[in-house]
Image (cartoon, grey):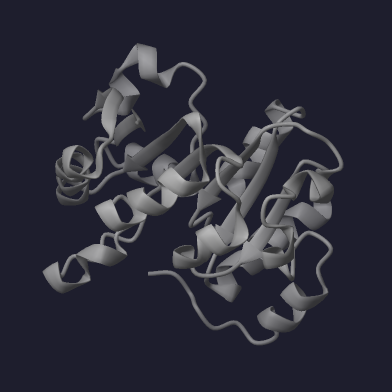
Amino acid sequence: MRLRNISGSREVIAQSPFVIHEPYQYKGNWKEVFGNDHPVRIEIGMGKGRFLMDLAKKNPKINYVGIEKYSSVLLRGIQKMASDPMPNLYFIRMEAEEITDVFGRGEIDRIYLNFSDPWPKDRHAKRRLPSREFLARYHEILKKDGVIEFKTDNHDLFQFALEELEPAGWHLEQMTEDLHHNAQMMEGNVMTEYEERFSAMGNPIYKYVIAR
């Protein structure tokens, strides 16, 4: 379970130069934030930021935005960035439901969903990040040829995600139920903290890449 209350975390976030504090004003104009026209990719539920920081290092000509709603978790990412800042990565503290208020139509090149909260109760299905409700939001902000990459260790969540594709108008580009034993999909794979932990325990990692 993630820690959600660390004293002073909100104050640190409010003063951090690595956080975009008024993201709504940049809708459709994220090139102003980064000062270039490079592709913009986002991770929704970035956790402590390791995944995006590794990607940003490897791909200096791609811009990244990490979205996290829990202040105490985002704080860890800020602390990591303070020791190794990167000009092509920024963070936002916000609810995932607000992404269409922050990014313009077709502004995002790729979306990453990594080890998202499964929200196991049926009445919370709309809150799951691979739900058809969220897929509709992603449709608005993704470029026409944009894709979503989703990884999880939760079998039930992955099955739910697969079932949501057809009614939402999306299709599979790639899929595996054991990522770390799939040479093709492992090529260039960047692990998250959760992925490293779960795979070390022998848990299979599920992944899909989807497009419209």
- In the rendered image of this protein, does residue 56 appear above or below residue 118? above
Nearest to the observer: residue 122 or residue 5: 122
Q: The N terminus lies in which quarter of the figure?
A: bottom left
Q: The C terminus lies in which quarter of the figure?
A: top left
Q: Is residue 39 left or right of residue 3?
A: right
| Identity of the residue drawn at 68% across and 58% down | 91
Q: Is residue 20 left or right of residue 176?
A: right
| Identity of the residue drawn at 76% across and 77% down | 14
| Identity of the residue drawn at 26% across and 59% down | 118
Total labels drawn: 0
| Identity of the residue drawn at 63% across and 34% down | 55
Nearest to the observer: residue 183 or residue 170: 170
Location of residue 40 (image quadrant): top right
Q: Name the residue at the top extreme.
A: 184
- In the rendered image of this protein, does residue 205 appear above or below residue 117? above
Location of residue 77 (image quadrant): bottom right
Q: Is residue 129 left or right of residue 65?
A: left
Q: Name the residue at the bottom extreme.
A: 7
Q: Position of residue 203 (x, y in %)?
A: 25, 40
Whether residue 111 is visible here, answered yes or no, is yes
- In the rendered image of this protein, does residue 19 appear above or below residue 196? below
Q: Position of residue 43 (x, y in %)?
A: 53, 48
Q: Position of residue 28 (x, y in %)?
A: 68, 50
Q: Position of residue 114 (x, y in %)?
A: 42, 46
Whether residue 84 is visible here, answered yes or no, is no
